Amino acid sequence: MVSELEEVRAEVSALRDEVAHLRAETADTRVLAAMADRDAAGVRAALNGIGRAQTALRETQVEQGAALSAHGRMLREIAQLVGSIAEGQQRHDEMLTEILHRLPDTPGTSEGG
């Protein structure tokens, strides 16, 4: 009977040691889980920041695209106006040349001189 009692005491002692070890492991696991949760929160915050930056960049690109389109339209209009002005100048040059050819030679202005 003594050996049975000693055997039970040894088993109880072993179980107590195992429970203490498991409690320590559980505490360590909780610490690791809390650290992982903080890390995950940091990653989520960083991803949210990146998402906000991408949204702002997208909005800026849309605004700039609209501005570039407006500038392109204005440049086409200016090019048309410059073309019209150039055509008008060409017509004026031709008309002035024709008028000059029709004028009688005045003394001191003839080419043969």
Image (tube, rainbow, N blue to C red):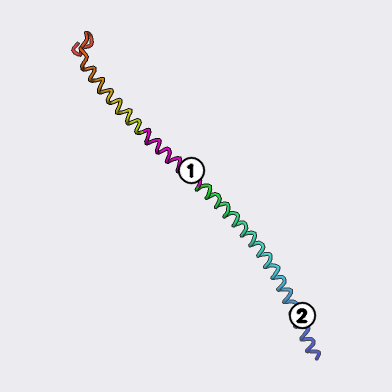
- What's drawn in magenta, residue-wise? 59-78
Residue drawn 43% across the image and 39% down it: 70
Please tell me whether residue 6 is drawn above or below residue 17 in the rendered image: below
Identify the residue at horizontal 20%, vertical 14% (top origin). 111
Q: What number is the disc on residue 13?
A: 2
The percent coordinates of residue 22 (x first, y second) are 70, 73
Mark 1 or mark 2: which is in front?
1
Left or right: residue 78 compared with residue 54: left
Q: Which residue is mark 1?
A: 63
User: Which residue is found at the position 22% from the left and 20% from the top?
Assistant: 98
Secondary structure under the numbered disc 1 in the rendered image:
helix
Binning the other alpha carbons within 10 Å of mark 2 as few (below 14), some (14 to 19) or many (20 upward) gives: few
**Circle 1 residues within 10 Å: few <14, some 14–19, many ≥20:** few
What's the amino acid at mark 2? Answer: Ser
Identity, as a three-letter code, of the amino acid under mark 1: Glu
Furthest-top residue in this view: 107
Q: Main secondary structure of the magenta part?
A: helix
Spot occupied by residue 88 in the image (x, y as percentages of width and height): 30, 26
